[in-house]
Image: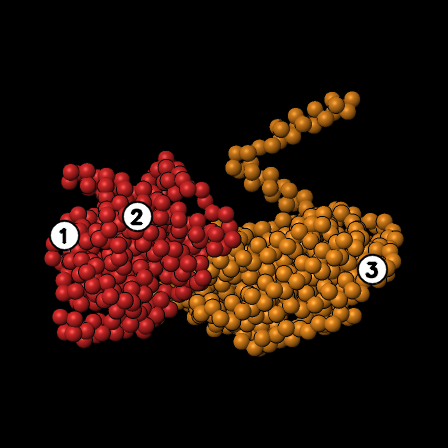
Amino acid sequence: MAIFNILVFPGFVFLLGFALAGEWLDRKLYARMQSRVGPPWFQPLADIIKLSAKEDTIPNDADRTIFKLMPVVALTATVVAIFYIPLWSSNALSTFTGDLVVVMYLLTIPTLTFFLGGWFSRSVYSLIGAARALSQLFAYEIPLMLAVLSPAMLAGSWSISEISAFYAQRWYLAPINTIAFLVSLIALLGKLERVPFDAPEAETEVVAGSFTEYGGRFLALFRLCVDVEMIVGASLVAAIFLPFGLGLNPWLAFVVYLIKVEALILVLSFLRTIMARIRIDQMINFCWKYLAPAAFLQLVINLLLKGYVQ
Amino acid sequence: MTTKDVVKIPLGPQHPALKEPGNFILSMKGELVMEMGVRLGYNHRGIEKACEQRSYLNDMYLLERICGICSHSHSTAYVQAVEEIAGIQVPARGLYLRTLVAELERIHSHLLWLGVAGHEIGFDTLLMYSWRDRELVLDLLQSLTGNRVNYGFNTIGGVRKDITDEQKQDILAALKPLTERTKYYAEIAGQELTLIKRLKDVGRLSKEDVIRLGVTGPTARASGVNRDIRKDDPYAIYSLLDFDVVTAETCDVYGRTLVRVGELFQTYKMIAQILNELPDGPITAKVPRKIPKGQAISRYEAPRGEDFHFVRGNGTDKPERVKVRAPTLPNLQAVSMMMKGGYLADMPITLAAIDPCFSCTDRMIELHDASGTHENTRSWSEIRELGIQSYRARGVDFAELGKRLATKLERVSR
């Protein structure tokens, strides 16, 4: 059963399917909002298959081991993270005290692999993209961490399952975390390197950033990783901030979960549609000037409320 | 600052930010651009030389292909010069129609620019929207001239096609949605925060520098220089049209955006006026095949700035010399000035803000001899000989092939 859970449901196979569906939904919504037709439903899968069939090219100067290893590490880290996030009930596949920190850590790994992969590609565009990815990490990671810690503080637990159970019982407390919810959504945009925070892979400036030298299977893995990261990130946000419909019968709860994640994807696509890419210095300024203080404010509110709730 | 900290990054000749090949070497310190070097010459097509071997009318079609966006600009600038040499009076209706297409072209060029600018700053929605709206104009141009680009609408002495009442109504009908959409873009430019943040104070070019470098078009007007050939040296029917020259005082990319959007409104106004005042009569004048001896210059306000043509005739049906200066040439000089001290991230939009067209600009390649002698004038046959030798050095020899071809041709002629 455990192996089935890890490999098929809700593990690897389900997650990959959901990630590709999520990518399609995102691209389709993005296209429709731009008055384009958008891709057919199988396009993300077709892209992966096509990329996988391509020849691997590794730059001569690149560190071959790291270049090949990074996409695998990135995908593994994101897939592992899903096991600690409760999806349609308050029980994750595996849980222990402090798994919130572990999930945050696992979700940081892809960005680090983007940095290392780009850095060891040894191309100027990759170098700039890698440096930008790392600077961006320092900008959004703190607000994101604070934003998910505030609800944990109120719930009095550092386990995502317990946080989820806490808010599922006291649904009226969930709206208190609205600021943290918005902060985490914006930080998620930064994590996924999407417009307006896509400076690390800005096509018109640094070609494809860290991914400039990547192609074939390796690029396919990186793309899968970003797709999975979107689903995992959205699931995490849904588990912590949207604790609704968890007590329903499993099938219904599953549908509610899918709707929640898709709604979050819609919001992310919408934000991507209406904004221009901001410069990396503007991004860092924005995160430290507005995002981090907002997350702090939430932390203070939750600290004050904590005594009152208990 | 030591030289060790400075990283040199090539932008181009192949790069996603560039739609045409051009090479820019950026000396970077972190994300800051210290210096920028420009290298052009990837698109030299020898059009000016080719013009000398074709008849005046054929040259018009050739020159139209200098640029895919402002094709009408080049053909009009050229025919104006030829008409001046030949002393041809173009009928009023011909001039009106020429101006109509010119202004429609300006709409499509400015909408295209807006989309490209959006893409350069990662605002792809703007690209999709403005290019969708651009289709309206392209459809009009197609129905009017038969082509979406490279219209072939001009001819020496007038225009090739007349306009029907139906087409007139179509154009007037299309002006309404276009005006509405442009108002929407003006609104976006005034409200969207990320857009303003990316455009304001980027690529600054002072008024003094504009005058010193001879910058033209919207780039100059955005720095508060009231410079528009349509007003300063009116051609066609611009002296009869009622329009304002749009300027901005911000001297940055944001100003260049506002100027272009503002110009769109002026253009809509002009098109309505042209159609309302369109006189009856012939659309073209009779032109002799041989153009008399003489020379003329012609200036034209293309969407990107001043387009300059010089034509010298020697009394035959072929011009002796045609010289073209596209608006990108003076504007490109200014880009390195705009870039100094800027961010790498602003490089694409700063370059795009002058609406560059490298292939329009490439007029010559200067050959620098490795030996250091600066003898650059070479005759046509010398260049041919040089080409043959350089191929021979690389192991490609056409001499045998040439002989075989010659014997074959001889046999055929017998």
Q: CA distance from mark 3 to mark 2?
A: 67 Å
The residue pinned by badge 1 equals A95
Instruction: State the image quarter where residue A273 is shown.
Output: bottom left
- Say which colour chain B has: orange
Rendered residue at 34%/56% (across/down): A264
Quadrant assignment for the C terminus of chain B = top right
Chain letter of the residue carrying label 1:
A
Q: CA distance from mark 1 to mark 3?
A: 82 Å
Chain letter of the residue carrying label 3:
B
The residue pinned by badge 3 equals B93
Rendered residue at 33%/63% (across/down): A186
- Point out residue B26 in the picture as x, y percentages from the top left corner: 44, 61
Q: Is residue B97 above or below residue A219?
A: below
Kind of element beneath mark 3: helix
- Point out residue B211 in the picture as x, y percentages from the top left corner: 61, 74
Chain letter of the residue carrying label 2:
A
N-term mark: 2 or 1? 1
The residue pinned by badge 2 equals A255
- Say which colour chain A has: red
Q: Amino acid at mark 3?
A: Arg
For mark 2, does the 10 Å Cα neighbourhood hold few (<14), some (14 to 19), or many (20 or more) residues?
few
